[in-house]
Amino acid sequence: MTTRPKKHTPDEYRSSVLDMLGLSSPFEHAITQARTDIVIARPAARTDVDTHFPTIAELPRATTVGEDTATEGLVQRLWEASEAVDQELIIEDWAPETPVDRAVGRYRWAWWPVLLGALIIGIFLVVMNLRGIPVSQANDLRQDWAGSALQVQASLPAARDAAAVITDPGADTVALAEARNSLIGFSTSGAALEGLVSRPFPTPPPLASGNAFDELKPIQADLLAGSELSAEVEAALADAITYRSLIDQSFLLPLLPIVADEVTLTDLGGQLATAIASSRAAVRQLPLGAAFEDHRNSALSLITRLETWQASFLDALRLSDIDAATELKTEITTRISTVRATVGQPLSLVAADVGVSLDELEVLLDGAVVRLTEES
């Protein structure tokens, strides 16, 4: 911004003012004090209307002829000097200056860099926020997976105890019921883990990388394998409970006499038919699997034998053939006892398989939890 130059008063202007004030000569009497003996007459009204305004020299003034002449000369000189000074000042003060124009131009275009900088900062913040979304989502998955895996770990001791009871042929009904209830926590936690790790990863937003999710894929694979092992253990123990329960419900034959009359034969025939039919239905519902295969085949073979054995035994009783009836009775009771007594064989195989699966599950969970907690 430029400073205004000092006002330059020419000598003609100063001399005219001094002359008008009577200060040009200390010995000359001029208009140095107010005149009270002069009456200024009111100028006559003009009848013509125009745009001409009188100058100072044209204004009427009640003075002497000498004073009027001197005053007119001073006023004229002052007027001419003031016009020259004013015109010069106007030209100096109001001439266009280049620095002012440049400043105005800079002010007019200064918002463009600000807008561009704000736009760049905004884009940078948006990109950084987008890149942080997958990382935040991956951290949330880590926490959820770790918490679910820890719950499965906490249920492993109860699962081992339940497996020991379920695969024990000597366990009674009450112990089996308690073992079944203790498996609920293991089953629930395993299902929750599977539900979490089986979900697909979120889709990364634009300009964001999915590396955070790629790092979780090996852990996801281990947890999926662990959830599958958990489901396999649960299914194996459930099959074991079902198997031994169906065996207990099968082959419940009535008392087998070696001598019977017609009434007894009639009642015995109906009872044997009902027992064999229910046994057949139960054996056909026995769970499949490598651990149960041999024992299940023995039970199916016994059912087939019972269908023909029934007729032979009733005929022996009808004919009062005590030897034949005794032999047939011994045969069938022995086979039934053998099937019931050997149920521990498939149960022991189940116990071995479940133990291996639980060990593998524990290793997988331990490794996954360590990686999830260390890398989070």
Image (cartoon, helix red, strand yellow):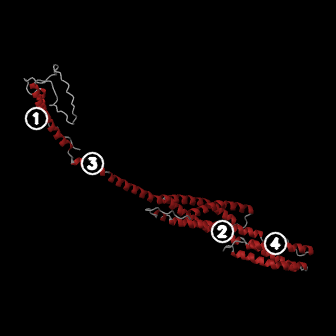
What's the residue at 29%, 49% (across, down)?
107
Q: Amino acid at mark 3?
A: Val
Report the front residue among 221 and 130.
130
Q: Where residue 144 appears, x then y in whole percent?
A: 54, 58
**Above or below, 196 relative to 96:** below
Query: Which secondary structure lies at badge 4?
Result: helix
Mark 2, residue position:
236
Report the front residue among 347 and 77.
77
**Mark 4 Cα shell of 10 Å, populated few (<14), some (14-19), many (≥20):** some
Q: CA distance from mark 2 to mark 1?
A: 125 Å
Circles 3 and 2 in contact, beta carbons < 8 Å:
no
Q: Amino acid at mark 4?
A: Ala
Q: Nearer the viewer, mark 3 or mark 1?
A: 1
Mark 4, residue position:
275
Q: Earlier in the sequence, mark 4 or mark 2?
A: 2
Report the front residue among 239 and 111.
111
* Residue 88 sits in quarter: top left
Query: Which secondary structure lies at badge 3?
Result: helix
Q: Which numbered circle lies on residue 12?
A: 1
Q: Which part of the image, by quadrant, shows the N terminus? A: top left
Q: Is residue 223 left or right of residue 251?
A: left
Q: Amino acid at mark 1?
A: Glu
Circles 1 and 4 in contact, beta carbons < 8 Å:
no
Q: Nearer the viewer, mark 2 or mark 1?
A: 1
**Mark 3 Cα shell of 10 Å, populated few (<14), some (14-19), many (≥20):** few
Q: Earlier in the sequence, mark 1 or mark 4?
A: 1
Mark 3, residue position:
104
Q: Where residue 196 appears, x then y in whole percent?
A: 56, 62
Q: Earlier in the sequence, mark 2 or mark 1?
A: 1
Q: CA distance from mark 3 to mark 1?
A: 39 Å
Q: Where residue 355 appears, x then y in whole percent?
A: 62, 67
